Amino acid sequence: MTKLSKESLLFAFGIVLTTMTNIRFSSLPIGPGEIVLGIWMVIVSIGLIKSRYIIEKENTFFIKYWVLFIVLMIIGGVISLVSDRFILNYVVYDLIAYAFSFSICLVLLYQGRLQLFLQKIKYCVVLGGVIFTFLALWHSMISPSFFGLSLGGYRFTGGANNPNQLALFLSAIPFIAFFLLVGTKKTNIRIVYGTVLLGTIFAGLETKSDGLVASWVMATIILILAHIVRRIDRPARLPVILLIISSIGFIAVLNNELIYTTLNYIRNTFNELDQDGSRGSLWMQGLETFMGSPIFGFGPGPQLVYYGDYRFEVHNTFIDLLTQIGFLGMLLHLWFLSKSLLKVRHSSILFTAMICLILFSASHFVLRQPIYWFYILSLIQLSLDHKHNQIDNSIITNRI
């Protein structure tokens, strides 16, 4: 194993461990995974000092986003301090988590070597998929703990405090594994990626995360539709899309019962995802909190007041962002997501993976998790390289 392979494996191991939040130190967003990634950053940074690498122009929007994000967080924090909402331990916790994720992104961007990025993605997908599939099997067949590591009760957590933290890690893996699977002609490699794909789905279902399942289902539907549209000649795409929409509307008009059945199904599905209204109530409270400082928000930390100094989150990345960095922050985040989606549009599979991450973020707050940012960076890098045909055809081909 080469020195660079060891570095990529160290990174993947650290990313997997960051998902196991149950082994973090008390009251801090730091644990073995964060320590491993910290060591990785030091090792890579020493090498970068000598290389003098400059971030590619296509990736500078990432830096712009983070700089503006930090500025808005500081302004919101000042407003929180003035309005007597400032609670130091929440602020410090969030700032450490944000700074850590930003630092990882910065090192990855400055490292900037395509083959290393590809290597990290493959290691994270395979290592994470194998570990959590194994732990899911252990949890369902043998024991709710693995040598002292709690794997959850009814819901599989894989060592995380919350099953939804694990669900975030698993959310994009099936699509990335599928992308890599169809891009190789080697049977043994295909078996590995296929096993990871199926194992990840099993582990994801074991988390009992409705948000994850809903994101997978909706993203898969989008993938199928995108694949169909891409097969149609460009001039005929718009007429075909309009024909499909018109046909659905015509069928609905002729069959009123179909409309009511569909609406009832959507409403019942939402009620299940919403845990019988509890999450919807949090979202409404979040919007009310946002109106207290609609332009800049109240800065880092959960902003919904329960009692005294106890706060909690909205469990919706977009509404949580509104409470933290306000309307300007939301515009910033939507700009960032739109730029990211444009950069992955050249591959329907990677585009779908990005959509899945965005959909999942609507049911949980994900911005403190390094894996979220790593996935976005990875999808962008894979798609940009796919567009320019710079990756060896034995790894990623033009069949996608």
Image: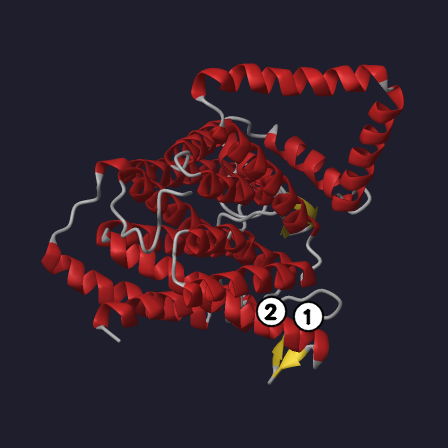
Q: Secondary structure at mark 1?
A: loop
Q: Answer with the quarter of the image where residue 14 lies.
A: bottom left
Q: Answer with the quarter of the image where residue 60 lies.
A: top left
Mark 1 and 2 residues: CB-CB less than 8 Å, in contact? yes
- Report the residue that reaches farthest toward the right: 257
The numbered dot on residue 366 is none
Q: Name the residue located 61 percent from the left edge and 28 percent from the top edge.
A: 291
Which of the two residues, 123 or 35, is positioned nearer the viewer here? Answer: 123
Q: Secondary structure at mark 2?
A: loop
Q: Amino acid at mark 2?
A: Gly
- The answer to whether 6 appears left or right of 259 in the picture is left
Q: Is residue 294 visible?
A: yes
Where residue 208 sits: x, y (%)? 71, 58
Which residue in the structure is indicated by mark 1? 152
Where residue 341 sits: x, y (%)? 43, 34
Q: Name the residue located 83 percent from the left edge and 24 percent from the top edge.
A: 259
- The answer to whether 47 appears left or right of 225 in the picture is left
Where residue 215 sits: x, y (%)? 62, 44
Which residue in the structure is indicated by mark 2? 158
Residue 229's place in the image compared with 116, above or below, is above
